Amino acid sequence: MAALQLSIIVPTYNRLPDLQRVLGQLQRMSRPAGLSLEILVSDNSTEDDTQQWFAREQPAGMIYHRNAQNLGQYNNCNLAIRRAQGEWVQILHDDDEITPDYLHALQPYLTDPDLVLVTGRSIFVGTNAAQVQQQHDLRLQQLKFTYPARLNGRHLFTQTLQLGCPFIISHSLMRRQAVLAAGSFKEQLRYTGDFDLWLRMMMRGDFQVVDAVMGNYHLHPGNQISTRTTRWAMYMESYCHALYYLAPLQHYDPAGAAAFRQTLSREVPKLRFISGQLLQNRSLSRRLDTLLQRHKLLARTTPASLPYMVLNALPAELGGQLYRGLMNALPA
């Protein structure tokens, strides 16, 4: 019987030292019997010495592809997934790490035809790591996860849509055909494309979490959400796709959808303020307004919403200046 194949995709952009570290880990890791590996490096038109390094070193067992131009994070991943030959794929970002034997814990689950994603534990390291790890662990508690556990996809859909995403893309193995059938990553998203894809995959199968550390997830100033502005944008994007998936949630869990609508309505004043006076992103603002109108979601007045309602009532620039001044006075 032919060995099961996993394609490990390493997207990279201008981070050669990090790339060299993770490729070294891939070369040294323990490979389970019966699992064939394909390692694909997808260079998103880097401007450093990545191309020259590959031409000079020609690391064994690795396939290098360079895009003629920068295609964006998710488009780069989508094209690499289409090139991959494995039944399973892993998107291992160049700035993250793996433990040497992580595949041994995951391999027994890869032959289960009803699973579409297999993952384990991640360790956060770097800037604000302790705080982020605490928030991550709290989310796992709210979701009532145990390790190991098989998670019903549709039940997980209702849970994570309301409580947030508990998985790390670099440390998750995805069934390639399920990714393609779900439509792959949405290329117009910037921050939440992995969670958005997983929500669609949850409708196609189950997820498995194993009691094994997959590796380190690095937090550093180069992360996409390392500034307040990018965190605001991620918050906006997350809210928009929560609205987008409210209709299927209504189908699977009407009571849960009604409660979730109440939760979302409390955020409307804050969202409108962020989109209109802080981000000044017309495209994202139009998308938000369209989704709010579609679901007839009105702002709900609560003590937490009052400051944003007051700021929204001020002239746009004045409200934004006041809020930015307050934020600048607080720690990042």
Image (spheres, rainbow, N blue to C red):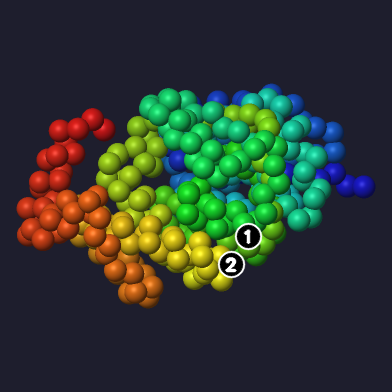
Mark 1, Cα crowd under 10 Å, few <14 / some 14-19 / many 20+, is some
| Residue occupying the point 43% across, 25% down | 130
Residue 98 in percent (x, y) is at 61, 29
Vertical placement of residue 290 versus 60, above or below: below
Which sits earlier in the primary sequence, circle 1 or circle 2? 1
Residue 73 in percent (x, y) is at 46, 50
Residue situated in front as seen by the camera: 51 or 35: 35
Residue 227 in percent (x, y) is at 30, 39
Looking at numbered disc 1 in the image, what kind of residue is underneath it? Arg
Determine if residue 78 is in view: no
Residue situated in front as seen by the camera: 225 or 19: 225
| Residue occupying the point 69% across, 58% down | 205
| Residue occupying the point 45% across, 52% down | 192
Tell me the residue that label 1 is attached to. 154
User: In the picture, which quadrant includes the C terminus?
Assistant: top left
Vertical placement of residue 201 versus 102, above or below: below
Relative side of 277 to 200, left or right? left
Relative side of 231 to 209, left or right? left
Could you tell me how far apart the alpha carbons at marks 1 and 2 are, in whole angstroms?
8 Å
Vertical placement of residue 76 versus 149, above or below: below
Residue 186 in percent (x, y) is at 49, 60
Element under disc 1? helix
Q: Are marks 1 and 2 in contact (CB under 8 Å)?
A: yes
User: In the figure, residue 324 lies in which quadrant?
Assistant: top left
Mark 2, Cα crowd under 10 Å, few <14 / some 14-19 / many 20+, is some
Relative side of 237 to 253, left or right? left
Residue 252 circle label? 2
| Residue occupying the point 67% across, 30% down | 212
Residue situated in front as seen by the camera: 293 or 288: 293
Looking at numbered disc 2 in the image, what kind of residue is underneath it? Tyr
Determine if residue 141 is in view: yes
